[in-house]
Image: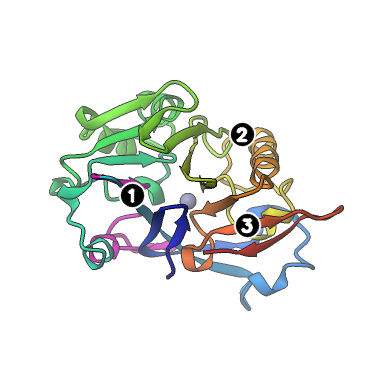
Amino acid sequence: MRASPVGDLTVHPVFDGTAVLPAAAWGNADWSAHRHLLDEHDSMTVPVGAFLVRVGEQLVLLDAGVGDVRNEMFDGGHLLASLHDLGVAPADIDTIVVSHLHSDHMGWLVTEQGSTFPNATVHIGAADWAHFVDDEGDGPRRAERMRRVEHQVSLIHEDGATVAPGVTTRHTPGHTPGHTSTVISSGTERLIVLGDALHCPAQLTEPEWQFLYDVDKDLAVRTRQQLLRDAEAPGTSVLPCHFAGMQAARLLPAEGRRQWVLSG
Ligand SMILES: [Zn+2]
């Protein structure tokens, strides 16, 4: 997997495992122009994991993988080995931004052994905390796990919070109520780490496709469209969590239909 450069910074993929997404998760979307993304079972197997960026002395982890789990949808467990390959121990991480509190983005925050990243401040959108922890939106177990690291959590209440020099959060609700993207800026370049604002490359050109697990599907579409308009600005790339190779993409200015290429 290739790292994505952003000016003087480098954003490294931290592979944790894979997820299987059936085409049916996009409802009645027309796949005719995107068949190459699907396997013979009309599914795609996509990576899950996190991204790491070193900003000065600060080590920033974006998302926290799925954890050491194997079930129908997820096959995870490699995140700590991937960090080790980058020369990073869990205790070295001092800043984490969790895009949202679905299981494949917070999986390693806390395990049976306790907090995996004991020295990190964990930034989470306040509306996600309210939905998944206070209101137990995905059940009591998720909420209980998150409460075990509550002492490390810093809730994001305002759009554009700076968590490290050149690293700011952006409120991108829809997939979940407090879904948070992260904008990494260096020099004239900018990378928008999208979390799950998009799930597959087809949504770069079909942002109106609705995804089964978007909590507010209409809001998710509006957020996606706005993000993609912003991503057309010069020097800007996007980095979704679940694209093949965990690689960034750049949108190309085009008349009419939008086009994109992998960058990095
Ligand atoms: Zn996800």
The residue shown at (77%, 55%) is 258
- Name the residue tied to disc 2: 216
Outermost residue to the top:
157
Relative depth, front residue between 6 and 140: 6
For marks 2 and 3, the one nearer the N-term is: 2
Instruction: Give the number of the disc on residue 119.
Output: none
The residue shown at (58%, 52%) is 237
- Name the residue tied to disc 3: 250
Relative depth, front residue between 70 and 217: 217
**Mark in front: 2 vs 3:** 3
Residue 132 lies in the magenta-colored region: no
For marks 1 and 3, the one nearer the N-term is: 1
Residue 134 horizontal/vertical position (percent): 36, 23
- Name the residue tied to disc 1: 64
Which segment is the magenta one? 57-81
**Mark in front: 1 vs 2:** 1
> Does 211 sit above or below residue 39?
above
The amino acid sitting under disc 1 is: Ala
2 and 3 marks in contact (CB < 8 Å):
no
Say left or right for 140 vs 200.
left
